[in-house]
Structures are given as structure tokens and as C-alpha cells.
Image (cartoon, coloured by chain):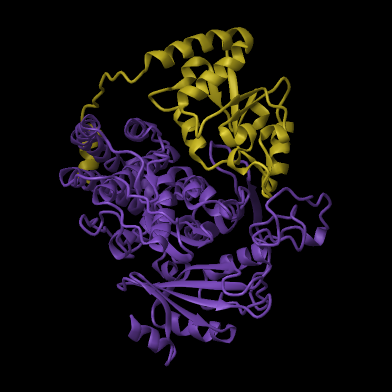
Chain colours: A yellow, B purple
Amino acid sequence: MLPVFKNIISRKKTEDISLHDPEFEAIGRDLKAAVDARMRRSLAIRELDSGSDNATEIEINLLSSPHYDVERFGISFVASPRHADLLLVTGAVTRNMEVAVRKTYEAMPAPKYVIAVGDDACDGGIYRGTYAVLGGVEAVLPVDLKIPGNPPGPIDILRGIHALMTG
Amino acid sequence: MFAEIEALKPGTVPGLVRPGEISVRITPGDIVPFCRSAAERGFELVDLTCVEGFDREGRASLFYCMEKRGMPEVLTLVCTLEDESAPSVDCIFSSASWYERKIRDLFGVDFPDAFDRRRLVLHECYPEGFHPLRKSVPNRPFSPRTAIPPEEEYRFMPVEGKGVYQVPVGPVHAGIIEPGHFRFSVIGETVANLEVRMFYKHRGIEKLAEGKRPEECVAVAEAVSGDESVANALGFSLAVEKIAGIAVPDRAEYLRTIYAELERIHSHLGDLAGMLVDVAYPVGASRFTVLREEVFRLDRDLTGSRFMRGAVRIGGVGFDPSRDQIRGLSCFLSDVQERFRDPLKVVLASPTVIDRFATTGFVEPRFIRPLHLTGPTARSSGADCDVRRDHPYGAYADIAPPVRVLDAGDVLARFSLKASEVMDSLSMIRTCLEHLPDGPVIAEAEGGGVPDGYAYGMVESARGQNVHLVRVRDGRIDRYSVRTASFCNWQVIQHAVMGNIVADFPVINKSLNLSYAGTDL
């Protein structure tokens, strides 16, 4: 009980920490200008895991963490494909996910974009030609851009989104 | 151990015996009596898998891997089947149900008296009679079924009654997470039942490994579950090293331990942050997320990969850190402890957090043995188990982890336990650095490659016990079977959420930190 009470009455500390990397910031500022111009100031992203090994999800999640904090650049991750402009697809598309992948894409309003994130999403990666996958994302959906990597880091992913918005 | 085996059935003669592993050949008629006797004597089913062509071409052999707390060896019962069916042991070991359904899908071995005979891994799109891990089935695309007869659609367990309604969730979830389907049956806000349907991410990892040279397969092991890359690369390598009799140099053992503990730290930091996000306490979460990102950057500086891919190789490690890198790691360690402890104190003194964590998602101790729960999930419910201490590998024989056990079994216990494990891992890395031996970091390659044979590799990942069975034939991988901690731990979530409200599901799920990729394979 005592620590709880102390926590309530004590002065809250704030600290001035600088976490931002100049290269990332530069891409972000440029991306914000593109999002402002092209997407009327907001780009809504839905993430879809079609069969990844979960490392790419971690990197995409970290885009919203204090080091990166991409909401500053007009980007938001949304809970439903119905609210999304852009689909980030990770992993080769498995047989068991095929229907869900198609339905997710169909649920998005037009105009819509698809980015394949990670080697497996780009062309099937190590799973190419095996029984359990259909291949990369383009085996099922029209893909606008590919971001290779095993997995690509947060900065690579932001660079990819930037390329799509400025291309 | 031999007395224990003799007690299972008098006159039993062990087959393969090597340090840490004992196997016994049994006949199909022996499966049920042996398993019953083993269960009565306190053995747990660690893994159940199938190997084709183990001693006769085209025939399936079942491998029942068991352990008993306090016993350093694992016991494997190997049974070659006469035909394509075997008796079920799901009434003896509850965890056997998922294994048997998986073996039925992938190998076509039937368990006619099993209580649940639904498909597990291969969903409806796979044609009936398609069993991909059979040697006769080539690893290439097949024609899927387009029309699925209604009677073959997956049937969830019916839950009916006044006021019961269903909440179907997934496979695509609202957050940035992996796919799986949750079927809640609720009465008002309270969960009366949950059934999980997994394996949406089945990508054929085990078949993919077959025919590859062992060294090519480390990358396949890393793909089992991204945030367990080191643990799984290590589990696979341990098995191959046992088969080939490779002695890993001391310096490599210490470096492996450092990499494995760094992985545990970034995984646990992600869990701690995730649990706080799920109870709407992002201020606390941010502090842990910042540390986690710093660990990822440190991992990249040490190994070239944020997930330390390529760090573990058969016979040792892929990177020997320079003096500067070791200095960087030491600096990080001396600084991070305070930066971790401070926010932790604030979080654990926050009424909004405690209110949501305490008594939520209770994992009852009675599920631990039947489902073979391991890792922080089991240790937070009173189980004293840790592969690092029970079956030591790497440098853990020299630097044993303090195995912490809590009894409460709720989200708060899992949060607190993971927080103390982060501190323990930091101090273990510091000890490793202090005693880091000099010398090579990879065993000298001997000509002739890996001889035929099989072995188990067992590791404690951040999530618990991961078991890798590797069989090599003519220098190539003949069978690679992986059972991650998540495969077993997933099954307890169905019990842990009962009686909780739907809104607490995310935090319960996060506190159990289950890998979909590592389960679906």
C-alpha cells in the first residue's frame, strides 16, 4: 500500500531524452510532406501477417515506439482494413491464410496500396515452391512495392513507405 | 534412471544411450501400458512426433519423449507401427491430443480411439489423404480443394445455454500481431469457454528442412519463430553436434549464452511493455520499449542482425566480438540496470496496473503436468522447471540461472517473474563477460560431415522449453521435428481466460506471450 500512496502524492519526474536518429527524421519529414500532399494529411495502414516468422511484426510495431514514433509523420496503424489506405503484408502467403488475405484486401476501400514486407513476402523466400505456401504476396494480391530484408528494420520499412508515397 | 526404466516394465532394455538421452524400443501393444505406468511415476510427455523410415522404409515410428523432474536424462519410447494406426494416449497425457492430431494430418497415422479426431494443422483447403511429411509426397505445390463439403468444415465445440453467445475473433486481429482464430462463448461479459484454432501460419518448416545439409538448416531453425531465432538455432545445433560428436569451444559456449540471454531480455521487455499497453498504461510501456530498441541495436552491433540471425552456427558461433564490442556491451549492462529498475518500481506501485493484473488470467497448477507447461508461464504457477538448470547446455553448467518460482499464477505473477528474469539475465551476461575464455569460437571442421543418427536438442527459450529432434541420413536432414514451448502453452489459455471478462483477454494473452509462428510451423 505504501508504495502506491507514495506514487500518488510524489512529484512526477520528466526527463528530456533525445532518441531520434537524424537520417530517420529526414525521411520522416519528407514522407510527411508527401502524405500531406497525396493523402490529405493522413495515411492509414493495416498490417496483415500472411505467414511470417513474427520478426517483421516486431519491427513494424516498433515504428510506433519512442525511437521512431511515426504518427508524427501522418501515419497511423488502424484496426480494420475498412479504415486502411495501405496494407503491409508480411510473410509468404500460406494455404491456410489465403482466404483471409483475399478477404482483408477486398474489405479495403479504393484507392488502396499493398506493400510486401520482408524476403518471404517479396517472393516466397525460403518457402518458394513448397507445399504449404502459394508464394510471395503477389501470388494473391497486386503488389505496389516490395521491401526486402530478413527482417527489414524500422528504417527500411519507413524508407519503403516513403518510396511508395513519392513514387 | 535405469531403475526407473526397469520399473516401467521389468526386463526393458534401453537402446541408444548417450549423456542426457535414453531410448527404449517398444511395440504398439506396449504404448498404452508404458505411457500409463510412466505417467503414474511422474513422467511428463515432453514431445510426441513421428519419423518415417526410421528402421523400415515406408513405416512410421512414433517417438514419445518424456522427462521426470529432477532427472537429468530424457527418456524416449520409440515404437515402429505395423500399419497406419496407433492407440491414442490422450486420456493419459492431455497434451497428446494436439500431437496425435498433428501426426494424423502430416503422416496419415490414425488414432481411432482419440476423443478429438478433427484436423489440426492442415485446414480444409488441403485435400483428404494429403499427408505432406510422408516421404512419397514431394515438397511442391498441390491442387487445393476449392469446394469444401459442409460436413468437412471445421466444427467448433458447441457451447449452448440460456444467454450464451459467440464472439468469433480472427484470424486477422486488430493489432499488429500474428493470425489465429479465437471462438469465445460468453455470458454477458464473462468468458464461459474459449476455443483456439491455430495453424493459419503453417508454412511447412519441417518438410522444408528435409534433404538440406545440416549447416543450411540453421536458417530454417531461425525461421521457426523470429524472436526465438537464437534459441531455435541453438536447439537445432545442439542436436546436430550430439549426432556428430562435435565439441564446441568454451569461448563459443559463453558467447552462445550471452546471445541467448540477450534474446530473453528483448523478448521479456516486449512482454512487459505489451502487458502495460493492454491495460492502457503506455507511459510505463514506453520506458521498456526504449530499452528493448536499445537491446535490438546492441544485437545488431554484435552480430549484424537485430534478431541475431547467423549468430549461432553448428560447432560454435558466427561472430567473435572485438574488444570494443565487448566494452560496448559492458557499458550497456552497467547503465541499463537502473534504467530498468526505476520504471519497474513506478509500474508496480500503480493502482491502475495492479488492479488489472492481480487475479487476472489465473493458470491453475493442476494444468502444468498434463499440458506440459514450461517457461515463465509454469514458473509463475509454482513449477520449478528450467531447461538451463535441468539439462544444461552452453555455459549454463558453469553459470546456472537462479530459477525463480512464484505461486500466484496470475498476470501480475507473470509480469513480476519476467521482470526478475530480465535482471537475472543481465547479471548472467555480466558473469559470462567476466569469465569469457579465450580461444576459437567454432570447432575445427572434420572431414566426412555428419554421420547418420538422431538426437534431441533442448533449450530454454524466453517462452520455455523448446525441443528439436534431428535425424541425419547420408549427410542430409532426414527429419526435423520442432516443438516450441508455445505449442504446449497455447492450450492453457483456454483455461486461463475462463471466468475473466473479454476485455481482459488481450492482457492475459500477452502475459502468456505465445508464438503463433512457433506453433504453426
> For the point 65% across and 57% down, which residue is it?
B163
For the N terminus of chain B, the quadrant is: bottom left
| Image height of A111 relative to B113, above or below | above
> For the point 57% across and 67% down, which residue is it?
B51
Depth check: A65 or B279 in front? A65
| Image height of A100 relative to B456, above or below | above
**In the image, residue B390 lies at what x, y percent?**
30, 65
Residue B161 shows in the view: no
**In the image, residue B243 lies at what x, y percent?**
42, 63
Outermost residue on the bottom side: it is B10
**In the image, residue A155 lies at what x, y percent?**
46, 22
**In the image, residue B240 lies at what x, y percent?**
43, 58
| Image height of A75 relative to B362, above or below | above
> For the point 51% across and 36% down, which residue is it?
A57
> For the point 50% across and 29% down, which residue is it?
A152
Q: Please indicate whether residue B379 sits to the left or right of residue B164 in the image.
A: left
Which image quadrant is residue A127 in? top right
Residue B353 shows in the view: yes
Outermost residue on the front side: it is B447
